Image (spheres, rainbow, N blue to C red):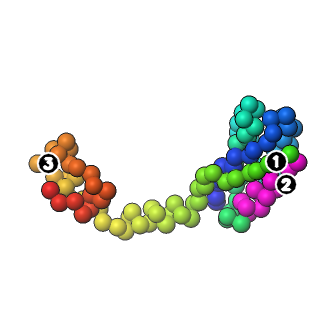
Amino acid sequence: MNISSIVVQVRSEYIDEVVNTLKESDFCDYHFHDKSIGKIIVTVEGENISEEIEKVKKIQAVPHVIAADMMMAYSEDELEAERSKLETGPNVPEMLNDDTIRAEDIVYNGDLKKKII
């Protein structure tokens, strides 16, 4: 399952009409809008990115929508792949389990796995 947030841009005089259309639709979930700047926040869900893109296209086709852009996406498959990397990858760096090293003395340089004290 994929879930993505979409920012919809609309001229402020049409925002109520577009909000109502999106609320009544079956292709997105309405969350918030700011009439003063003409922005609406919705989310779309899909089994894959193709299904999400189709729903974004439906939002873009709503009358008075200037733009509808995907801002943030969550993909269950990607999450599982990253979890798998964590499970099969190396454990916590030795230095983080060393009680003789004070936390204040650890300097992070972007990669604790390669850091030598």
Q: Which residue is mark 2?
A: 61
Look at the image and give the residue range highlighted in magenta. Answer: 51-63
What amino acid is at disc 2? Answer: Ala
For the residue labelled by badge 3, is the local secondary structure a helix, a strand or a loop?
loop
Report, in whole angstroms, how far the alpha carbon at label 1 lies from the one at label 2. Answer: 7 Å
- The three-letter amino acid code for the residue at tag 1 is Val
> What number of labels is visible?
3
Residue 94 rendering spot, x and y as whole percentages = 20, 59
Upstream in the sequence, badge 2 or badge 3? 2
Q: Could you tell me which quadrant the N terminus lies in? A: bottom right
Q: Which of the 4 image quadrants contains residue 115?
A: bottom left
User: Residue 108, image x and y in percent?
Assistant: 27, 51
Looking at the image, which residue sits at the far top?
A: 36
The residue that appears at 51% across and 63% down in the rendered structure is 80
Residue at the image position 67 percent from the left and 64 percent from the top:
49
For the C terminus, the image quarter is bottom left
Residue at horizontal 77 percent and vertical 62 percent from the top? 54
Residue type at mark 3: give it: Ile
Q: Are marks 1 and 2 in contact (CB under 8 Å)?
A: yes
Q: Nearer the viewer, residue 37 or 52?
A: 37
- Residue bearing mark 3: 101
Whole-angstrom CA distance, mark 2 to mark 3, is 59 Å
Res 65 seen here: yes
- As helix, strand or loop, the secondary structure at mark 1 comes to strand
* Marks 1 and 3, how far apart at CA: 57 Å
Q: Is 80 in front, or is 71?
A: 71
The residue tagged with tag 2: helix, strand or loop? Answer: loop
Badge 1: residue crowd in 10 Å (few <14, some 14–19, many ≥20) = some
Label of residue 65 in the image: 1
